[in-house]
Image: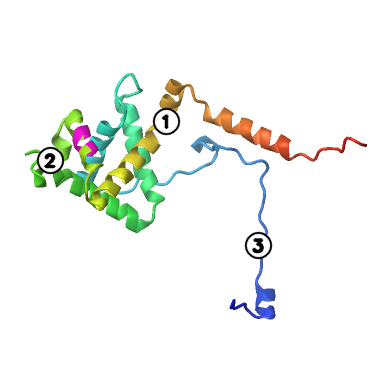
Amino acid sequence: MTIRPARDAQAEHTHLPVAQAGQPRPSRPPSMGARFAEPYPLGENARRVLCALIDALCPPSPAPRSADLLHRVELGARRLLRYMHPTVARLLALGLVLLDVLPVLTLASRLRLHRLDRARTSELVTRWAKSPFKALRLLIQGTRSLVLGVYFDQKDVHAAMGYAPIAFIEGRVRLRTELLRPVRAAAE
């Protein structure tokens, strides 16, 4: 049985008008008025681990790779954390600290994760992604998705892949508009 509010309660509900400001753009860089969130405030240790994981997870050469690009990935990942539920963001930050000490706890290394070289960090992350512990697998999957999602959204990477997302999306919007346009009947 469905319970519905009384008719007069529905009549009291007001709808606010929505202002339409022309055709929405598929992408709005900051120069067009979009405001990005402030980076999530990670602790110093969690930031070091995030930087080590970014270095280990981002593809090696000949893929685009520079200090500036890796810094933008770190900044983008921290901004993306702001858009997550606060509990998820906090748990991911705590998970980064756990990942830092995990090589020592599992006797895989005498050094913490942020002190290992890129190849060893990548090897450990690959091993942890196949762990029998679901929580660890999910932590690695979430971190990998966070880092690579931001990495593959960089203009340098788009250019290297020959991908022009704005032109592609605008083309798809034009095609959709064309397909939804009413068609005259052939008999007329």
Callout 1: helix, strand or loop?
A: loop
Residue position marked by numbered label 3 in the rendering: 16
Q: Quadrant of the C terminus?
A: top right
Residue position marked by numbered label 2 in the rendering: 112
* Residue pictured at 26% horizontal, 52% vertical: 135
Q: Which mark is residue 154?
A: 1
Q: The residue under label 3 is which amino acid type?
A: Leu
Residue 6 drawn at (x, y percent)? 65, 81
Q: Quadrant of the N terminus?
A: bottom right
Q: The residue under label 2 is which amino acid type?
A: Arg
Residue 43 drawn at (x, y percent)? 23, 48
CA gap, disc 3 and disc 2: 54 Å
Q: Nearer the viewer, residue 66 or 19?
A: 66
Residue 125 lies in the magenta stretch: yes
Chain part drawn in magenta: 122-126
Q: Earlier in the sequence, mark 1 or mark 2?
A: 2
Q: Earlier in the sequence, mark 3 or mark 1?
A: 3
